[in-house]
Image (cartoon, grey):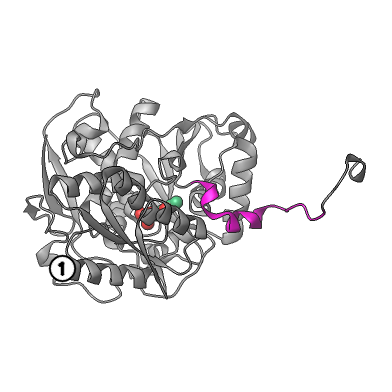
Amino acid sequence: MEFHYCCSICNKIFDIVPELTLCPDCLKSQQPDQPLSGVLEVKLSGSSDENFTSLDLLPVEQKYFPPSPVGNTPLWEPANLRQKTGFKNLFIKDDGSNPTSSFKDRASFLVSAFAKKFNINDIALASTGNAGSSMAGIGAAAGQTITLFLPKTAPEAKLVQALQYGAQVFRVDGTYDMAYDISLAYSQKKGGMSRNTAYNPMTIEGKKTVSLEVFKQLGKVPDTLFVSIGDGCILSGVYKGFRDLKQLGLIEKMPKIVGVQAKTSDALFRAYTTGKFENIPTATVADSICVDVPRNGIHALAQIKEYEGEVMTVSDDEIIQAQANLSSTTGLFTEPAGAAAFAGFLKSAPGLDPEAFIVVLTTGNGLKDIASASLGICLPETLISSVDDIL
Ligand SMILES: *Cc1c(COP(=O)(O)O)cnc(C)c1O
């Protein structure tokens, strides 16, 4: 297999080197407060039969990957939920079961290997919490030095997790968007590799492995796949995996991808309906998808248009209810951003074929943010001291 970079806007081809992050030509049209212009994709050439492993289709050789069991996450067949909803072929791909308990490990894993290959030991990034704790954990396995920029609103569990893994953490007095800019400025001054999402092409490429796994686990392409959207990199990664399979002739049709945003942090949804990205301050209980300017917005939107996907929104109430609903019917406890995808499925259910093969991607473990999860339950208020107090 051979690999190159290809600009997602102008299709220019480049060699894969760590110095190159965005297409130098398309970068010239970058506007302030807009998504990244000239996001690079990895393009593969070669052939493969269906016996490939995910590593075969990634642009870094196996020997550079850290010893961390990333991916190969379980595809749940939730019997109670199937019965309750009437969807016989409903599946949940639980990426909260990755080593650091979020989907972000798929990107960190490849970024770590890419840095290792080029003898780069320092990796910096901005994160709402999961990308940071993920890079910190994968970096710990690889023996790399990780520097994080987290907004002050990042849930404590994600901060503590990153510090446990030994990362250097800077808390930013502002939003994730501000952390993103500070992180880029830091990398430009200090050198090393930036793992900022979409800016580093390996983030999208690493995320494609989820689709390769879903294809293998189902033995076919699902009809519809629900995934939440923040910066839009997971969404693009999901598309990239299926596109690679199509290019290799292993599948014929693309699945319909439904991207789900929080109603109160809906920059990509607004651009999907109006065609314009606007930088408006947003907030949602689903911190992992709280993004004002989706860095991968242009690229993600182009994919949705080309493959007839859809973007929808769900309210914070719907997210919190969906989270508790999923936990109590399946035993799968996912964080609010993961529950957003499930809320999107529940909201869309009346218009879906009950025979369809549907995959809901849960992207993070619920224990990462118990403050939000507490909103969906009633904590027992009184303390008891004997069984007589309750019987
Ligand atoms: C990062 C993240 C998302 C959204 O991914 P994007 O690439 O930013 O769209 C969704 N869920 C969880 C748990 C995440 O950590």
Check the image and report above or below for 218 versus 114: above
- Name the quadrant of the C terminus: top right
The answer to which of 29 and 255 lies nearer the viewer is 29
Residue appearing at x 34%, y 27% in the figure:
216
> Left or right: 250 with respect to 293?
left
Residue appearing at x 34%, y 64% in the figure:
294
Range drawn in magenta: 365-382
Q: Amino acid at mark 1?
A: Leu
Within 10 Å of the Cα at label 1, are there few (<14), some (14-19), or many (20+) other Cα atoms? some
The answer to which of 156 and 270 lies nearer the viewer is 156
Is residue 381 found inside the magenta-colored segment of the image? Answer: yes
Is residue 20 found inside the magenta-colored segment of the image? Answer: no
Query: Residue 320's image quarter?
Result: bottom right
Residue appearing at x 41%, y 56% in the figure:
163
Could you say where residue 105 lies in the image, as x and y percent from the top left?
A: 35, 45
> Left or right: 71 with respect to 251?
right
Q: Is residue 237 visible?
A: no
- Name the quadrant of the N terminus: top left
Could you say where residue 207 lies in the image, as x and y percent from the top left?
A: 31, 45
Could you say where residue 10 lies in the image, as x and y percent from the top left?
A: 13, 59
Query: Would you name the residue on which mark 1 appears?
Result: 27
> Left or right: 82 with respect to 266?
right
Could you say where residue 152 lies in the image, as x and y percent from the top left?
A: 46, 69
**SS for dot 1:** helix
Query: Residue 280's image quarter?
Result: bottom left
